[in-house]
Amino acid sequence: MRPKFVHLRTHSAYSLLEGALPVKTLTQTALAASMPALAVTDRNNLFGALEFAETAAGLGVQPIIGATLHIRDGEDNGDMAFLVKNAAGYTNLMALISAAHLESDGKEGPGVSIDDVAGAADGLICLTGGPDGLVNKLLKTAQNDKAESKIGILNNIFKDNLYVELQRYSDTEADGVEEALVDFAYDMNLPLVATNQAYFASEDDYRAHDALICIAEGRYINEQDRRRLTPDHRLKSAEEMCALFADLPEALENTVEIAQRCAFRPTEHAPILPAFSKTDELAELSQQAEAGLTARLQQVEPAMDEQAYRDRLAFELKVIGDMGFPGYFLIVADFIKWAKNQNIAVGPGRGSGAGSVVAWALTITDLDPLRFGLLFERFLNPER
């Protein structure tokens, strides 16, 4: 049977000091409620994207990757949510999040401009943001013409990937914004979408979440003039959402449509290490290690014949090459040398790595393995 509603605005615990839903709890709750798909739109980050994607997919729930970002447009500001349709969208969302943090002056929270959004719209679905959105805030202050202009700008940027977002809570019933939003959507032929920002699992979690909000803002629970959410900001069932938006069935149907359009999820892959482009990595490592060993043996009195060091070095280099670790040694040597040149304290070496002549020659460690009878095989061993 076709689902009737999909949550598109949930916040995991990775919405730091705001969300109270660990990824595991969120996905298991969705599974228990027979939700076929679920979007996580954490604030200003994708910290939980991979964990969420792997966990949800493993449970048979379609993960939808997204994020909530703060938009600054001159003197106007507000939130918007972005959902990933494909790999290009994921790349663009990462770029927007990076820009949000890099462009912040530290005095105010992360945020991006409309121009930033326009340059990274490919592959993304945009939701207008709900009560804290840029458009809603303008409507609350009776700036309807300006709000309509903002929607027009977003429509030009996102085309058929823009949805006018509607949220209904007990504290939004009298703000008069929804009627204007619906009128804008119909006049401009834009689709509506029903969402509910979920920060906690059930109504029983509301008081604990309220305390979390106080911790985030350095306030006390008994203070009146502070940010408050409502028990409505829980992970509501599809039945509750269908009843809440029974008068706007298209807004419910569009949640399912959006889920069908979002077919991307991040997957795990092996670490991607930087490669040395000028020479073969093993050749580069061998050259640096040979030169480094010569320098070491000139600085200290060898514990045994120099040839023993050369033989050990050749043996280690072969093992390192066979096991595919030349690049790893070069990277570690690079940042260790940089740290020492910057007068940053670096230890003499610890663990089994101290048994490597190559590491000693590259100044990664400062212990002579042959002098102390340390075994390289404890560090790297092809048979292990």
Image (cartoon, rainbow, N blue to C red):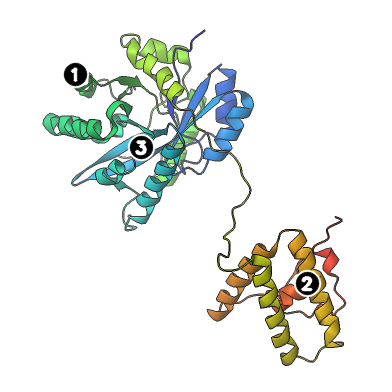
- Which of the numbered marks, if any, corresponds to residue 183? 1
Locate residue 38 relative to residue 360 in the image: left or right.
left
Marks 2 and 3 sit apart, C-alpha to C-alpha, by 49 Å
Q: Is residue 29 above or below residue 3?
A: below
Q: Earlier in the sequence, mark 1 or mark 2?
A: 1
Marks 1 and 2 sit apart, C-alpha to C-alpha, by 72 Å
Marks 1 and 3 sit apart, C-alpha to C-alpha, by 27 Å
Q: Callout 3: helix, strand or loop?
A: loop
Give the class, few, some or many, for how many residues have Cα within 10 Å of label 3's Cα (few <14, many ≥20).
many
Q: Position of residue 116 (x, y in %)?
A: 29, 46
Residue located at (19% from left, 34% from top): 138
Q: Which residue is mark 2?
A: 356
**Which kind of residue does numbered mark 1 sit on?**
Asp
Q: Earlier in the sequence, mark 1 or mark 3?
A: 3
Q: Nearer the viewer, residue 369 or 288?
A: 288
Q: Is residue 208 above or below residue 273?
A: above
**Which kind of residue does numbered mark 3 sit on?**
Asp
Q: Quadrant of residue 267?
A: top right
Q: Is residue 312 above or below residue 300?
A: above
| Residue 299 visible in this rendered orientation of the protein | yes
Q: Which residue is mark 3?
A: 122
Residue located at (31% from left, 58% from top): 105
Q: What is the tally of numbered marks visible in this picture?
A: 3
Residue located at (73% from left, 91% from top): 298
Q: Position of residue 221 (x, y in %)?
A: 41, 39
**Which kind of residue does numbered mark 2 sit on?**
Ser
Q: Earlier in the sequence, mark 2 or mark 3?
A: 3
